[in-house]
Image (cartoon, rainbow, N blue to C red):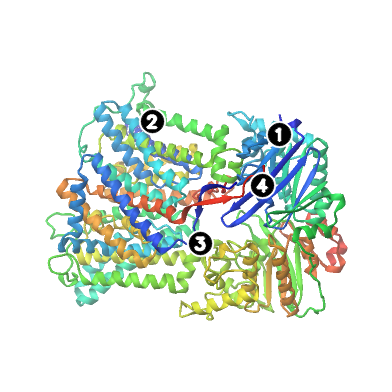
Amino acid sequence: MTELIASVISRSIAASTPLLIGTLGEILAERAGVMNLGVEGMMAFGAVTGFAIALHTQSAWLGLLAAIFAGALLAFIHAVLTVKLRANQVVSGLALTTLGLGLSGLIGRKLIGKPLQAKFSGLDIPLLGDLPVIGKALFGHDILVYGTLLATVLLWLFLYRTKYGLAVRSAGENPLATETMSVDIVQLRMLFVVIGGAFAGAAGGYLSLAYIPAWIEGMTAGRGWIVVALTMFSLWDPLRALAGSLLFGGLFVGQYFLQPYGISPNLLMMLPYLATLAALVQGATASTTRGRSAPAALGIPYERGER
Amino acid sequence: MSASHQRLEMLGISKRFGSVQANYLVNLSVTAGEVVGLLGENGAGKSTLMNILYGLHRPDAGAIFLDGVQIDVSSPAVARVYGIGMVHQHFMLVQNHTVAENIALALSDAPAWNPVPFARAKIEEFGGRYGLKIDPAARISDLSAGEQQRVELLKALMGGAKWLVLDEPTSVLTPREADELFILLKRMTGEGHGIIFISHKLDEVLAITDRVVVLRHGRPAGECRTKDADQASLARLMIGRQIDKPSITNLTVPGDPVLEVSGLSSAGSRGPLTVNGASLTVRGGEIVGIAGISGNGQRELLETIAGSRPASAGTIRLCGTDITCYDVRARTAAGLAFVPEDRLHTGTVPSFSLVENAILRDAHRELFSRHGFLDNAKARERSERLISEYEVAAPDSDTPLRTLSGGNIQKFLLGRELDAAPKLLLAAHPTYGVDIAAAAVIHRVILERKSAGAAILLVSEDLDELLALSDRIGVMFRGELRVMFPREKVTRERIGLLMGGAPATSEELRC
Amino acid sequence: MLTSKWRLEALSHPSSVRVGTTMVLSILAGLSLGCLLFLVMGVSPVTAMTKIAAGSFGSWYGFKETLTKAVPLTLIGAGLAICFRARIWNIGAEGQLLFGAVAATWVGLGVGQHLPGWLGIAAMFGAGAFAGGIWAAVPAFMRVRWGVNEAVSSLLLNYVAAEFVQFLIYGPWKGKTQFGFPYSDDLPNALWLPTFYGSRLSWFPLVLAGAAVVLLTVISTKTRFGYDVRVVGESPEAAAYAGIPFGRTVFSIMFLSGTLAGIAGAIEIAGVHHHLTYPWSISSGYGFTAILTAFLARLNPGWTWFSAILFGGLLVGGDVIQTSLGLPFATVNIFNGLVLIAILAGEFMIGHRLVRIQHPGDSR
């Protein structure tokens, strides 16, 4: 029984990691005022690129770097369209999803079924790793899991404790006022959309380099959309995103543990999506209380006054 | 740094937006210790000129000089380096953040790590020096307009501003708060600040400034020392001709009650009541004015009566019929017309043509649609009629409404609402931001309706307008409609105090 | 001295020539970029484009396939155009189509054989339309009641619908006559839509799509409801002021577009597959592609048939390059995505132009 619990926790954490990475990125972009619905596409493109490079160079780290770069590249398109050309953020995000999924299909066509040696595997942490239950549940993960946790805390500190983080939050609330305080809104938003894309790419890289070290077409399986929903559920707060993604990671894993009880796997597969819908409702009702609402300028293109 | 500079000048400034010449060869200067009034009608180019000074716009021609040396103000950051600060009419504050967070973002010397405590300490320091008390931990959205203005002033002063531009600073203040501001400005000039005070209110300019520069249609219209000027001479410079005060012929005898509101409350989007137990009656042939600082529930009161905001308690009767449960369309059909505060995005749809805007509130009526199909010919007919009857300057009925000036949009909107000869007109700030000629037309039309027997409920922040038009005047404060005076029994000063929250005397309450 | 400089100026009234040229150039730019990507990835763009063009428009058979795919795209795209006009982002047409297909199958297998053919078909389409509408009403309700972003919620429902279809075909509805394949039983023959010789195209869906285009064009341009929808999209505050009920409008347009998607689902069952099958076979991404269809038509329902034929051709092309070049079907998404990106950039070009302005000289 303890063995089972340890395994559920351990696998939940692994399943939640790509969700958390993606959500952190989307939080950054949305805090700056830009919604990016292209996470699914950026994740898929990141996953395939990361896998291809890792396979080619035999280095998981180079693969991850490539995944990050791939996500950022796609996000750059979104940044140009929505920030520079003030295109509709919903539509541009959908275009990104479509393009990313298409690219992953094209690039990945010869990678399907190839085994990957250069992957991120579980660390062997002495002492801690040998603890009963907890050792297996918490201390046997790959380096990226711990890196993501660290990133969560750092991002929280960045947003709430630094001047630049304050500028980012202000940009999403009132870009005009922020611009008069010598912050270049266009540049800042472009930057944070691209950084958000880098995170989405990394999330994809985690899928293909650590979670399931392989390339399977459509392996993102809607995680990008769950990320978008989790961002709303998290009320744009990295720490709440951590809690939310653990919950969803648990759901992803939980369905496999319920299968032996004769419930149709297809019905179980609906669970994460249905839970996400519930979370959306929770987030939407919670964000009507003050101080936790969506960034006031989210989704609204910023037009710099004519000069 | 800039502190020792004595004179800031703008010479030959020209700026064009599309087809509009916002500024043309304008000169303006200010010396240390002086308050310069920049006077002009709405749309005369005052804000554009100041946005150029603050680096928000680049001039097409002309230059800025500091003690005779040309400076290139390419951005607000550069402006601040030269000691130029600005308090915008619409505050440049993040509503969802605290005072300290807003200030921290503005301070160039705030540390990159943990800037908020630093800002908090500085707020205490500066607040004490200038007598600007403010709680650094307060959220901006919880502050009154006057307090928010103080935050803006602090922000500018803490940023090292020697030259301060104040854009229509009194438009959001109670008369008492305005007096406090004037005292503060005197104190600042005493410390060597130079101040540019933008306004279109003659009495204020005469009260506070040392020198006045007047703009008309973006061009310099004159400049004089304040002590050599009076209301009439300034008005002539500003408008180019004599202005006629609306002449009130208060001959109509109020008829039967048209609007009867009792105990009306409306919940805000975030909990507390925005309208709290308001009761009032407006009779036919009567104008009732509601005074109050923006944000005290006047807007919500009108919206609740019009039906676009739900009432949480109370009743509304129109000509004796209880319309509390009616929706917007049923109320419109019952004879209620409404000119809302935000004419561009609420009162009209800016991207729609005039034809489409002409039926915004009546598209469902049989007059303009049959079996669900719109009758475009009828809509066009109405649009053409409004254009000619209300002197709307528009090329034709098919132009998008947004290409019209504020005054013309307002005339069109007012005309549309009055087209079906309503029994009750609700009007919010009908002349706000409108040029004087259009304002005169609007006032004339409202008075004509009054003579014709319509009941009119008028909300305005312009006390002069209220005092000139209303038969009775009420004051709203924090969602409560207090006291209702007959026009002849109240003074401007008394209304000002009540707007600021002064308690009403028992005698007044009995009125 | 006169100085002059170039400046970007907004155009309030772009001419239709300007709009048309820019759209055509955008499509060409999107397709060219796609070709470039193929080149980079070691696939000859000439071969790929020739295969796509030949497969979709090069033969009578191919063109009929293109039309077969253009029908659901037109139906869904026209409905989405109305939604997007109101700035209501229905991204869930895929799920609405699937639910329409499920309901149509259910009616067809259940009561279909007891009714005369035409009545059975009518019942199938009615059920499909209703089910699609209901599936779209869910995100509409969540939006109106709780303020949940409808783009995300409607999209998540796509996944739920797809899993539900799979649950049915692997589970309770698994056909006894399908040799173990996860399909439902076939519809009785009387419920199959008659097709043109040698194709999967039938006149009935073509008529339906045409009727939908005409109907929605009339609704959006001539009726009060269309007017209300545009007011809601342009300014929700103005809609509240005018007494246009926001919730009811959102419901109506979501239900309407869901209905059209549900009809598309019924067409796939009655006209193409004749049984419930894998979700990705019932719809080759119609719900998504219809979003592009609506945008290429610049949200005019009257033009959706045109953009539907173009994207229908691309979808057929996707099948062709899958079989002849061994590329995954998803690759055709590259073209879709790039065309949409180019259209978005094109919108900016339509709305702005470079002008040269002259100023009076400096006074000093």
Callout 2 amino acid: Val
Mark 2 belongs to chain: A
Q: Nearer the viewer, residue C88 or C38?
A: C38
Are labels 3 and 2 assigned to the same chain?
Answer: no
Compared to C307, does B84 lie above or below? above
Kindly identify which residue carries mark 1: B160
Residue under pointer 3? C234
Query: Closer to the N terminus: mark 1 or mark 4?
Result: 4
B296 to the left or right of B187: left
* Residue with the mark numbered 4: B13
- As helix, strand or loop, the secondary structure at mark 3 comes to helix
Q: Nearer the viewer, mark 3 or mark 2?
A: 3
- Amino acid type assigned to the residue bearing label 4 in the image: Ile
Q: Give the image location of residue C262, x and y in percent.
A: 31, 64
Query: Which image quadrant: the N terminus of chain A?
Result: top left
Q: Nearer the viewer, mark 2 or mark 4?
A: 4
Question: Rounded to the nearest whole Å, what is the CA distance between mark 2 and mark 4?
Answer: 59 Å
Q: Is residue A102 visible?
A: yes
